[in-house]
Amino acid sequence: MTQQMNSPFLFYAHEVSYFSGKVRPALRYKRVPFAELLCTPDVFRRVILPRTGLGFIPIVVTPEDETWQDTSDILDALEARFPDPPLMPMTPLQRVVALLWEIYADEFLILPAMHYRWSTAEGETKARGDFSSGSGNPVNSNAFADKMSGSLLALGVLPETQSVIEAHTHDLLDLLEAHFSSTPYLLGSKPSLADCALMGPFYGHLFLDAVPGRLLRERAPRTCHWINRMNCPDPEAVGAWIEDDGLAPTLRPLLELIGRDAVPLLLDGLRDFETWADNRPEEHRDAPPRATGFHQTSLREVAFTRYTNAYSLWLATRLFDAMAELDEAARNRVEAALAGTGCEPLAQYRPRHRIIKRKFKLAFENS
Ligand SMILES: N[C@@H](CCC(=O)N[C@@H](CS)C(=O)NCC(=O)O)C(=O)O
């Protein structure tokens, strides 16, 4: 049924969903007239699947009855339609850094988020309860919980990686505490795409889940306050991003952490996907499957395997395009700012393949 032009945007989401936590602050910060609707199994069958052909939340349905899916596309669409206040920095370094944070938050922090939710009985019990209370159908939600907890192996959350995933998380919390003690948001005194992306893992999982929720409240009170500020953003009460396209000094160690731990792992996945794509079978000439196999990677010298997915290249292309659009002087300045952080190999990566979307599905460009 077509909605009235003055009806609100509909945000189909869930409180303990990773990616819902990324979009909700943007809707509120931009004062978008929206209603949040719980994604029950019925809504999933009636709305999500028919509109997108995919099994992912969140989605946004506009007053004109358009469907927006994928949090990166949703944030871009919101930015185009509600440009003020902006979330996407237009200056070269802050834009590149925001896109780096998006990749890190979406693709790497899924490891601690899933580990802390599913690796202990306490975490799992609360998550199953949250799923059931959201769906009203324990059989259905337990089957979904089985699927989610069953994905740990593919993600690389394994007995041998748990301690390095936790060590990374502790370092991240300590560096965020130092940053938020002097700077209210990642890029300065107002939120950006980087903050929204970090809210994905930090709100629905790390803040609300049993085990990391305690860790955050004990170890990272300023980060908890940032989560609350992000969830109730007041566009009238914010300042500006750091002047002259700068970065706060406390952001540098965070970029070094990302560069040391996340970038090598993300690059291993991208390279493996590209090798698969070079020799892909005829049936996948036009469109890749969601997972193309497994590859070797490592985190803090612990070697393990993870699944390889095409989506990672689509997401990283946002960063590659932002780098490619820079003129030489801007590019040199961005590269100089990132030099020594370990993030430069990702920012400078030149892919051989380009992944686009056709009706929400990933496809090879020019195929
Ligand atoms: N890249 C997608 C990811 C969406 C996503 O993975 N959503 C999760 C909930 S937070 C989901 O629906 N998972 C269902 C599944 O994996 O089957 C986005 O940014 O929107």
Image (spheres, rainbow, N blue to C red):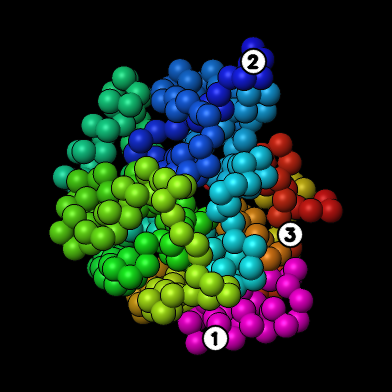
Q: Nearer the viewer, residue 47 or 173?
A: 173
Q: What's the residue type where badge 1 is placed?
A: Ala
Closer to the N terminus: mark 1 or mark 3? Answer: 1
Residue 42: quarter of image? top left
Residue that sits furthest to the top in the current view: 1
Residue 195: quarter of image? bottom left
Residue 114 visible from this viewpoint: no
Residue labelled with disc 2: 4
Q: What's the residue type where badge 3 is placed?
A: Arg
Residue labelled with disc 1: 339
Label total for image: 3
**Mark sitting on residue 354:** 3
In the depicted structure, whether residue 331 falls above or below residue 202: below
Residue 312, percent across and down? 58, 58
User: Residue at 64% of width from left, 71% of height from top?
Assistant: 92
Please say whether residue 347 is one of the residues in the magenta stretch.
yes
Question: How busy is the neighbourhood of tag 1: few (under 14 within 10 Å), some, or many (20 plus)?
Answer: few
Cα–Cα span, label 3 and label 2: 38 Å
Give the extent of the magenta segment. 323-348
